[in-house]
Image (spheres, coloured by chain):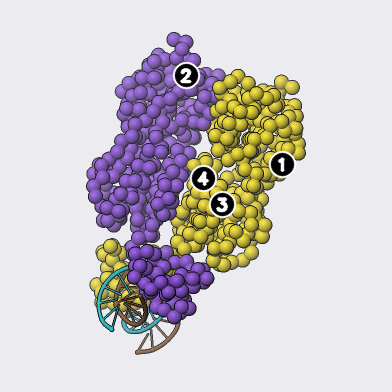
Chain colours: A purple, B yellow, C cyan, D brown
Amino acid sequence: VSATLADIAKATGTSISTVSRVLTGAAAAKRISPQTREKITVAAKQLGYRPNLLARSLRTRKTHTVAVMVSDIANPWFGQLASLIEQSLHRKGYSLVVCNSWENAELEQEYLRLLPQKGIDGLIIVPLSTKKEQLERYLPEEMPIVVLDRPVAGIPASITSDQEQAVRLLCDKLAMIGVSSVALVSGPRHVFTHRVRSEAVQQRFKVMIDHEGPAQRETGRLAWTQEIAGSRADAVVCTNNFLAQGVLEAMSAGNWMPPVAMFDGIPAMDLLPVPIVSCFQDVHALADGAVDMLLTQLDAPGTVKPIVVPMQVTWNKAFDKVLLSR
Amino acid sequence: VSATLADIAKATGTSISTVSRVLTGAAAAKRISPQTREKITVAAKQLGYRPNLLARSLRTRKTHTVAVMVSDIANPWFGQLASLIEQSLHRKGYSLVVCNSWENAELEQEYLRLLPQKGIDGLIIVPLSTKKEQLERYLPEEMPIVVLDRPVAGIPASITSDQEQAVRLLCDKLAMIGVSSVALVSGPRHVFTHRVRSEAVQQRFKVMIDHEGPAQRETGRLAWTQEIAGSRADAVVCTNNFLAQGVLEAMSAGNWMPPVAMFDGIPAMDLLPVPIVSCFQDVHALADGAVDMLLTQLDAPGTVKPIVVPMQVTWNKAFDKVLLSR
DNA sequence: TTGTACGCGTTATCAG
DNA sequence: CTGATAACGCGTACAA
């Protein structure tokens, strides 16, 4: 396809090693005579040489590629996360391969087995597995892994949001408008974030309806039409934004619009007539932190410490109105 | 790291090639004696052999990896696209690397230069460049490329939405509620979709305000606060959903809520008090079509034909109300 | 049926 | 300063 080191060596009457030394840059090139260096650089440019990074990786055991694994890249929150990670990685000369785990344990395992074979330098993962061994079973000893959004016992390279603090603030806000009983729409409880959020709510309010299902819009719709619509809960709490979106969409069919509490917001929140209060994770901090953590481990396999970033709570105008009317 | 063919050969007292033949599967393995086949399979399993796909790729010149390049994976529409593509590719045994071009020509070129070096089997791209040569300059002759969402002259492997038809329907719908003058909020016109949509609108309505900028939320906000809010256009037309989102968010600060026409919708559209009409691209068809097209070219470098998929127009309840009140 | 030997394109070691 | 030469791990013609 493209010219190789051998081609250039032949063209310039030098040897492969010399060409390699010149083209791999400053370090080794200093000790090469300016003439041959010039000769080789010119020939390389003229032949349109581009190094075969596969071959290089085979030799150096570095691919300059990292993988990120999330439940579903179509979820705008994960999308933003992936986007920031990609941007940040690209700046450092790394490429990104993405994997959708679909919150599916077998799929996660399959990827965990496949990725090292493909040759990645590191992995950023929003893990489904909660055991260190499950995650690292197929990973080479020296391969750095950063768990994101959900802590895993025994893995210090983790960066997460302060869920407890956030959900406390969220509940406070609900209490301020007189909420005492709620309908809870939760994603799968075996997932850390959903479990923590659910439990905090259960502890704080009277849960009249407790609907658990896949963290998709459809679950939210079902929860509303089958259970919540006929109830009289003071508010609806959703453990993520996909669920909330489903609830809101279903809600628009009727007239009753109870306050909704959610996480990570929804576009044009302020325009909605429904009172909404939402926690927001600091996506930028999480993304940058994860990349930093990964690259740190790549350069110097030192010890890293877990990071917990705070969340924020915001509400829309409709919520404000309720707040003021009391 | 992991056991290699040589390790297994040594362990079983056979040769590398025999091991390779057995482990690469059915084809060549048929011609190996059951005993040694068994012996090798067992040893491989026991040693935890996993093929080094880098080395294999170097040899076979196939990486089973494809790249997808979009403006920004954080845009939910591109996110959904990428998600569907990943899902579909994974099923066929391919991995996905994602690139954000940020609608930046230089960045796009940089990626186009980098990706072939990394070794990808094919590329799906939402192109910024409009010239075949720009896109293919650095790509190996035999590497399939599929352009998505925006046609490029001379590249038959393209799958796009029928923008003209869609925008016509959109304008029809606006006309039905008596719109005759509009404020236009457009992404960069050198991008196909934004240009086509803008021109169709300009041709159909009196454009009182014409705001062009990056296809981000911020542009929408600015357009509203700086220009549209003080105007009396009958409606606002945005050439994508990010722009519309910005407009809607800014709009919530005031009381005037003119109808908004957009593309690819916004979550919980039905709940918004603003009359909204939107075109929807068929993401599933686009994603599946792109993958099909790519894999077709990979198996058999035959000729492919461009595909144009229809779009649909939908509107929310607030729009319906306006419609009925006439 | 099996083994030998070579090549994929680089980097790294070791002479000279 | 430069050039052979040996890996890296795997596939595959060619021989046996």
Foreground of the two, A138 or D2: D2
- Tag 3: amino acid: Ala
Q: Are marks 1 and 3 in contact (CB under 8 Å)?
A: no
The residue that disc 1 covers is B199
- Pointers 1 and 2 in contact (C-beta within 8 Å): no
- Residue that numbered label 3 is attached to: B105
The answer to whether residue B223 is above or below residue A62 is: above
Which residue is found at the position 33% from the left and 34% from the top?
Answer: A309
Distance CA(mark 1)–CA(mark 2)? 40 Å
Q: Position of residue B285 (x, y in %)?
A: 59, 48
Residue type at numbered disc 4: Asp
Tell me the subunit letter for badge 4: B
Distance, label 1 to label 3, CA atoms, is 23 Å
Task: Assign a secondary structure to mark 1.
Answer: helix
Do the residues indicated by labels 2 and 3 lie within the same chain of the protein? no
* Horizontal and vertical percent position of residue B197: 68, 41
Mark identifier at residue B72 = 4
Q: Is there one chain holding both mark 4 and mark 2?
A: no
Q: Which one is nearer the viewer's eye here, B15 or B149?
A: B149
User: Which of the image's four quarters has the N terminus of chain B?
Assistant: bottom left
Q: Amino acid at mark 1?
A: Glu
Residue B56 in view of the camera: no
Question: Compared to A68, does A17 lie above or below?
Answer: below
Specify few, some or many for label 4: CA neighbours under 10 Å numbering under 14, 14-19, or 20 or more.
many
For marks 3 and 4 on the same chain, the one whose residue lies earlier in the sequence = 4
The x and y percentages for residue B57 are: 42, 66
Q: Do discs 1 and 4 share a chain?
A: yes
Q: Image point 42% across, 47% down: which residue?
A: A88
